[in-house]
Amino acid sequence: MKPATYIATHPVFRFDEFLAEHARDGRRQRTASVSSLRQHLAAGNLLRVRRGLYASVPRGVRPEEHQVDPYLVASKLADDAIVAYHAALQLLGKAHSLSHQITYLTRYRLRPFEFQGTRFIPVLAPAAVRALPDFGGHIIEVPRHGGRVRVTDHERTAVDVMDSYEYGGGFEEIWRSLSSIEFFDIDAIIEYVRRLRAASTAARIGLFLEQHRERLMVEDRHIDALRALAPKQPRYFDGRRSPGRLVAAWNLIVPEEILDGSWEEIP
C-alpha cells in the first residue's frame, strides 16, 4: 500500500504499523519509510501525537487545528490497548458523567500523558487475566471516525469498574452509569468474575444485580453463583473502610448511600 493511501485510510496509527505495511512488498527499507513520514509531516498531512504515534489530517485542515478522536488515540497507545473502565462506559454511551480522562488496559508499564486536553491513563490488566487472550475476553470493536476501537463490553465493564472502582469514577458514578444499561448477559458477568478470582468484586456486582434483579431479569441461580464467589468473612465495600451496614448475604459492609440510593436526593 502506498504511504499516501495508508495515511488516508488510517486516522491514527503507530510507526511500527506503518513500517510493516510500507515494507510488505520486501523492497522498501526502514529509511524510506522514515523519509516518507517526514515528507507527509512537512506537507501537513500528518500530526505527530507523540513519539511513534501519528494522526492523519483531513484535507483543508491545518495540523494544529485538527482534533484527533481521543478513543482512536487510546487504542493505539500500545499494541494491546483496550479502552476500559469509565472510558468504556463513556464510549458505549452509558457514563452518567463525562470525563476528559481515558483509561486503557495493557500488559505494559507505561506512563500517562496528555494530548489535546485529554489525559490517557494506562492500567495494567488484572494479574489473574493478564496472560489470557484479550485479557480474559469480552472485548468488542466499535467503529470510530474511520477507525476501529477495541473496548470492553457492557458485561466486562460492569465487573471491571466494581473491581477497580477508582477507574470507574467512584461508586455513585458507577451505580448511576450501570443503572442506565438496559440489559446484561448475567452468565457472561459470572464467567468473567470467575476468571478474575476476586471475592469482593463478586460481592459488589452481586449486590448491584440483586438491587436491580427485576429490571435486569436476574435469576436465583445467578445470585447463588455470585454468592458462592463472595468473601467468606465480612469485608468493607471499599479500601477506605467507609462506614456502613453489614449485608450478611454478601459479607460486605456497605455505605448507606449505596443501599438506599440517597445520592438520588441531591439536586
Image (cartoon, grey):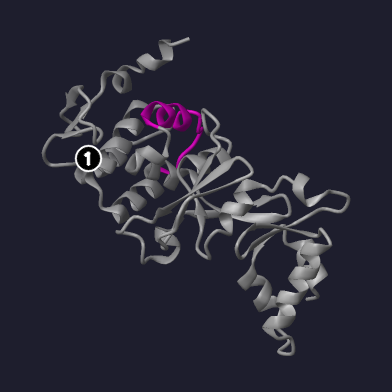
The answer to whether one can see residue 23 in this image is no
Q: Provide residue 155's location: percent of width, then percent of height.
A: 44, 45
Whether 79 is among the magenta residues is: no
User: Residue 246 vs residue 215: left or right?
Assistant: left
Q: Name the residue located 79 percent from the left edge and 72 percent from the top edge.
A: 3
Is 174 located above or below residue 6 in the figure?
A: above
Asked if residue 87 is positioned above or below residue 213 in the image, the reply reads below
Q: Residue at x 58, y 42 (%)?
A: 118
Extreme residue in the left direction: 233
Magenta span includes 184? yes
What kind of residue is marked 1?
Arg
Look at the image and give the residue range highlighted in magenta: 170-186
- Please state the horizontal and vertical placement of residue 233, each as a whole percent of the image: 11, 38
Left or right: 162 as drawn, with respect to 57: left
- Residue 97 position, x and y percent, is 52, 28
Question: Image height check: is 110 above or below 266?
Answer: below
Q: Which residue is mark 1?
A: 227
Residue at 39%, 16% in the rendered image: 263
